[in-house]
Image (spheres, rainbow, N blue to C red):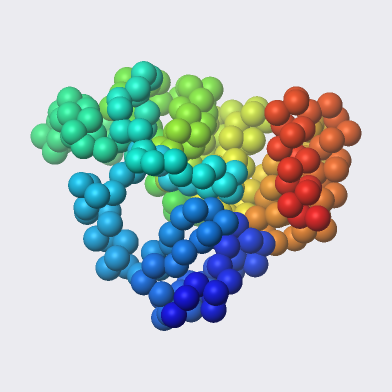
Amino acid sequence: MGSADVAYDPFSPEVMADPYPIYRELRARHRAYRMDQYDAWALPRFDDVWSVLADRERFSIVEGPVFHRERLLRRNDGAPDTALHRPVRSFSMLDPPHHTRLRQAMIDPFRPRAVARLEDDVRALAAAQLDALAGRDGFDVRHDYASPVSAAVAARLIDLPPNDGVALNNLAFLLAETGGDLDDALTKAQRAKQLLPSLYEISDTLGWIYLKKNLADQAIDVFKDLVVKEPNHSTYHYHLGIAYSQKGDKTQALVQLREALKYNPTKDEKDQIQQLIARLG
């Protein structure tokens, strides 16, 4: 059965808004779904995805996770470049043997015995966070408790001051932009936001990571707050437009994108805004 019987575009507003019905249809009809517009294939079934991830001889991860349509629109031209470049890219963009060698060089601080030595510190961090939450009527276990504690522990493992909000924000953005662990990036951005709630750049990072994770509603909440506080900031309007587009609300997306053009965006940003407006029609 050919790909024509299912119309699947991972970046379409309909799929962004609710991907699960078409995921079920793809699983039922296809082991591999050809997306000609992207010169790419989608694998909808778990066993096939697992097999590809385990086959490091015939498949490569050097292009990293793909979060933006523009990246997929670049046509493939032969085998991927697997050479080790400087600066070294994220682990999520390295194949063996480079990945294996770097992981072995960094693994010691993360081994069970080394981590066990942090037990008292981790318990103290966990208790302190619970104490800080004790006066509330309720809280989100992940956002308000687990994320700040895990971010602080990770910071200690790499000797990053756990209460340096700017450093955490910068690291979160770097992880998000280089194909790093988005859950880790989100944890660090949330911790930075708790430490520096009035710094708009941190809110922008947090919203951007929500976009990367396809959490459009959370991103919209963040960027709506930013455009209220900074109504003349082109980037915040642009990012809000992306969030609405991801949710499938073309009308609101176009409103925000056209608003962004009023406030002197950079040339690159202006080009991206105009491309998105053209795509939305």
Task: Provide residue 68's location: percent of width, then percent of height.
Answer: 56, 46
Q: Could you tell me which quadrant the C terminus lies in?
A: bottom right
Look at the image and tell me whether residue 132 can be seen. Answer: no
Residue 234 image-quadrant placement: top right
For the image, the number of numbered tags is 0
Residue 271 image-quadrant placement: top right
Task: Provide residue 256's location: percent of width, then percent of height.
Answer: 81, 46
Residue 19 image-quadrant placement: bottom right
Q: In the rendered view, does 10 fall on the left or right side of 151?
A: right
Q: Residue at x 27, y 61 (%)?
A: 50
Q: Is residue 147 above or below residue 164?
A: below
Q: Is residue 271 above or below residue 250?
A: above
Q: Residue furthest front?
A: 78
Q: In the rendered view, does 40 fall on the left or right side of 110?
A: right
Q: Is residue 257 above or below residue 29?
A: above
Q: Residue at x 59, y 35 (%)?
A: 205
Closer to the camera, 217 or 33? 33
Look at the image and tell me whether residue 258 can be seen. Answer: yes
Q: Residue at x 44, y 80 (%)?
A: 1
